[in-house]
Image (cartoon, rainbow, N blue to C red):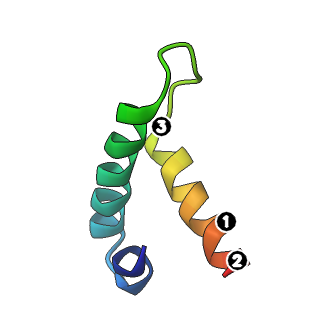
């Protein structure tokens, strides 16, 4: 999370979010909604607003 917020380059932010997305997908149930990169990015932005 810190790396995501500290990064200024959009491509690197996508790479960070992509790694987190992969981790989330490993824990996701097979019947759950498929997660996309935009979902992971949205979660990061929501958490930033709360913190």
The residue where tag 1 is placed is 46
Q: Are marks 1 and 3 in contact (CB under 8 Å)?
A: no
Q: Are marks 2 and 3 in contact (CB under 8 Å)?
A: no
Please identify the quadrant where the N terminus is shown: bottom left
The residue where tag 2 is placed is 49
Label 2 sits on a secondary structure element that is helix
- In the displayed image of the protein, which residue is found farthest to the top? 31
Q: Which mark is residue 36?
A: 3
Would you say 30 lies left or right of 43 here?
left
Q: Are marks 2 and 1 in contact (CB under 8 Å)?
A: yes
Q: How far across and how far down the image is residue 49, in percent?
A: 70, 77
Residue shown at 32% from the left, 41% from the top: 22
Residue shown at 72% from the left, 76% from the top: 50
Label 3 sits on a secondary structure element that is loop
Front-most of residues 1 and 14? 1
Residue shown at 34% from the left, 78% from the top: 3
Q: CA distance from mark 2 to mark 3?
A: 21 Å
Q: Residues within 10 Å of mark 2 (few under 14, many from 20)?
A: few
């Amino acid at each position: 999370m810190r790396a995501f917020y500290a990064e200024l380059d959009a491509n690197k932010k996508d790479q960070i979010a992509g790694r987190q997305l992969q981790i989330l997908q490993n824990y996701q149930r097979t019947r759950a909604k498929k997660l996309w990169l935009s979902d992971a990015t949205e979660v990061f932005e929501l958490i930033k607003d709360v913190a």
